[in-house]
Image: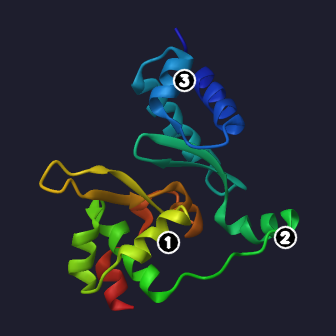
């Protein structure tokens, strides 16, 4: 039976070589272990990577090894990357609504913003900041949206719990 330290070592290696987020199911199947061991190993790795150049990022049932947001300028300079443009006010407003209210439909976003958001949502999906999570089981089967790993990376967040509370934003 696999112990926690062995699971951490294996998960760290798998996340390192994976080019995209890995599901907990994939980790469980690959390691042939129960969910509790994978969860415990990931929690431990998240803590161990705090304050370092790499992080273990979690969202829903996925995990990924990423560079620390505070190192982004160095990484971009090293790789010769140029930022591809800033987000518009409309995009930021829509993204904030999706981030705080997800899962959410386009109609719900439009109700809050008071304007058509189809183009803005399409652009946010194209930029990889928002993704389609599925469809509601009601008339019209509207698409429901949520944020992505790229959203967390873009804003330097480890997970959605690091979003400022609405009261904090209102007081600023």
Which sits earlier in the primary sequence, circle 2 or circle 1? 2
Residue occupied by mark 3:
4
Between tags 2 and 1, which lies in front?
Answer: 1
- Image x and y of residue 151, in percent: 51, 64
- Image x and y of residue 31, in percent: 55, 18
Q: Where residue 123 is drawn, which disc sits there?
A: 1
Residue lying at 52% horizontally and 8% vertically, measured from the top left? 1
* Residue placed most toward the observer, 17 or 124: 124
* Residue placed most toward the observer, 89 or 73: 89
The residue lying furthest to the bottom in this view is 172
Q: Secondary structure at mark 3?
A: helix
* Residue placed most toward the observer, 26 or 68: 26
The residue lying furthest to the front in this view is 140
Residue lying at 49% horizontally and 47% vertically, measured from the top left? 58
Residue lying at 39% horizontally and 82% vertically, measured from the top left? 93
Q: Is residue 164 visible?
A: no
């Amino acid at each position: 039976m696999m112990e926690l330290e062995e699971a951490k070592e294996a998960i760290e290696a798998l996340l390192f070589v994976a080019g995209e987020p890995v599901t907990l199911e994939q980790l469980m199947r690959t390691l042939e272990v129960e969910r509790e061991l994978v969860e415990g190993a990931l929690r431990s790795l998240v803590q161990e990577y705090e304050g370092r150049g790499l992080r273990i990022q979690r969202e829903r049932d996925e995990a990924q090894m990423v560079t620390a947001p505070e190192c982004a300028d160095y990484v971009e300079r090293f790789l010769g990357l140029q930022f591809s443009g800033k987000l518009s006010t409309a995009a930021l407003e829509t993204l904030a609504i999706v981030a705080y209210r997800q899962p959410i439909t386009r109609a719900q976003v439009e109700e809050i913003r008071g304007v058509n958001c189809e183009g803005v949502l399409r652009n946010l999906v194209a930029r990889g900041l928002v993704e389609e999570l599925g469809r509601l089981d009601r008339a019209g089967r509207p698409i429901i949206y949520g944020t992505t790993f790229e959203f967390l990376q873009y804003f330097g967040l480890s997970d959605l719990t690091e979003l400022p509370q609405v009261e904090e934003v209102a007081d600023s």
